[in-house]
Image (cartoon, rainbow, N blue to C red):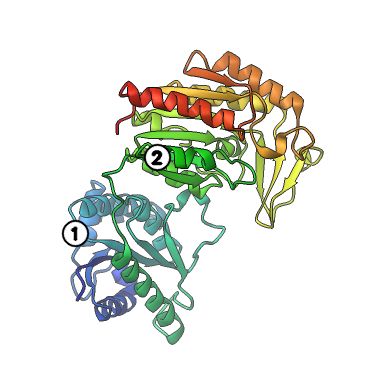
Amino acid sequence: MIDKKILLIGTYDTKEPEMRFLEEVINELGAEVVTMDVSVLGDPKTPTNISKHDVAAAAKMTIDEVIAQGDENKAFRVMSEGAANVVSVAYNDKKFDAMLAIGGTMGTDLALDCAQALPLGVPKVIASTVSFSPLIPPHRFAPDVQMILWAGGLYGLNSICKSSLRQAAGSVVGAAMAARVPDKNKPLIGMTSLGSSCLRYMKPLSPALEERGFEVAVFHSTGMGGMAFEKLAGEGAFVCVMDFCMQEFGNMLADSVVSSGSDRLTNAGRAGIPQLVAPGALDLLDFAGWQEIPEQYADRAFHEHNRLIKSSVFNAAERRHWIKAMAERLQTAKGPVHFFLPLGGVEEWDKEGGETHDAEGLAALIDEARTAIPSVADMTEVNAHINDQAFSDAVLSVFDEWVATGKIRQ
């Protein structure tokens, strides 16, 4: 046996054979199982470690009160709330090391809430009949959740669904064995950026910060990266953030599918983490590669990055709105904030002659920042492009000052 416990979540009233099969496979692989029943109506033949009554109680209801909702959707919303609460408390009490949930649309809906309730780095696997389906909006995914299609698994065990369930069991046991809690002895800086063809400041900044004794985690700001960044910031994982890529922020405000959720640019401030901020790539509006460009953006500058992602640009008025929205969020920060305004441009392709160059749009962004930011944060204007060494030098200058004055702990 290995010293790992897997929390197994499912509706034991309708899927007990599948759940017991998973228990057997997980035991075969050497791990222990903690069972959790999230059903509403029926009872399992064999009691689970965490009952449906426990789950309902965690949502401040009895199971009879849940049933009295009179609607399957409403009842399962209550059970989802209770399940997420149970999962969070049980993990903090060291009752399990990883979670595995199975379900159709109802079970998957609940499982997604459970995964969100766990810290980044805790293995989370969901075997679902709608795995990674467009039915699931991006913000519902925990940044590190793993999903597998529960093929042929809607009703009853068969050789096809057993294959899927075995893979799910192997995935969660293997992940539990391999997972390591991040080393918290070294102060960690969270940085947002894009691939180095668009934003490159992480190349000079990362080694400079490492030389100063800090660890640097760079998050790819294309949706899921920002979710992970915000989740860790909310947990207080960083001693400082260098939030220099606002692409997800503008996307969120413009309802792009390439978004990291509505809490972007809030969690570091709420946690009192020192923030160094810049409007990198705030000019870009992203679309999934498979999307048609909407007519309202069809006549704008355009960059097709690859088959997965392509970008149009925001106009001058939109850039002004986004800067104002940044200022509103930064104003609520409980820790120090310093804003860097690169006068030469905010991403590689906006340079003169580049595909997304828009002198009027950049001028509007700069003008609005000069108006909106100084009342909510200190600001440094950098007479350079965001990818120039001068920008990184300006950042390090403020960073070193904050370390020297104790604003950033080492």
Q: Is residue 348 left or right of residue 160?
A: right
- Amino acid bearing label 1: Lys
First-in-chain label (2 vs 1): 1
Q: Residue at the location (31% across, 76% down)? A: 22
Can the viewer see residue 27 in this picture?
yes
> Toward the viewer: 291 or 65?
291
Measure how far apart labels 2 and 1 are at the Cα level.
39 Å
Residue position for label 2: 211
Q: Residue at the location (20% across, 56% down)? A: 54
Q: Position of residue 317 (x, y in %)?
A: 69, 24
Q: Is 365 located above or below residue 2 in the figure? A: above
Query: Picture quarter containing residue 71?
Result: bottom left
Residue position for label 1: 95
Quadrant in which the C terminus is drawn? top left
Q: Is 200 located above or below residue 19 in the figure? A: above
- Amino acid bearing label 2: Glu
Q: Tell me if label 2 and label 1 are in contact, CB under 8 Å.
A: no
Residue farthest along the bottom direction in this orientation: 159
Q: Residue at the location (41% across, 43% down)? A: 216
Can the viewer see residue 39 in this picture?
no
Query: Picture quarter containing residue 311?
Result: top right
Helix, strand or loop at disc 1?
loop
Q: Position of residue 221 (x, y in %)?
A: 54, 44
> Toward the viewer: 134 or 257?
257
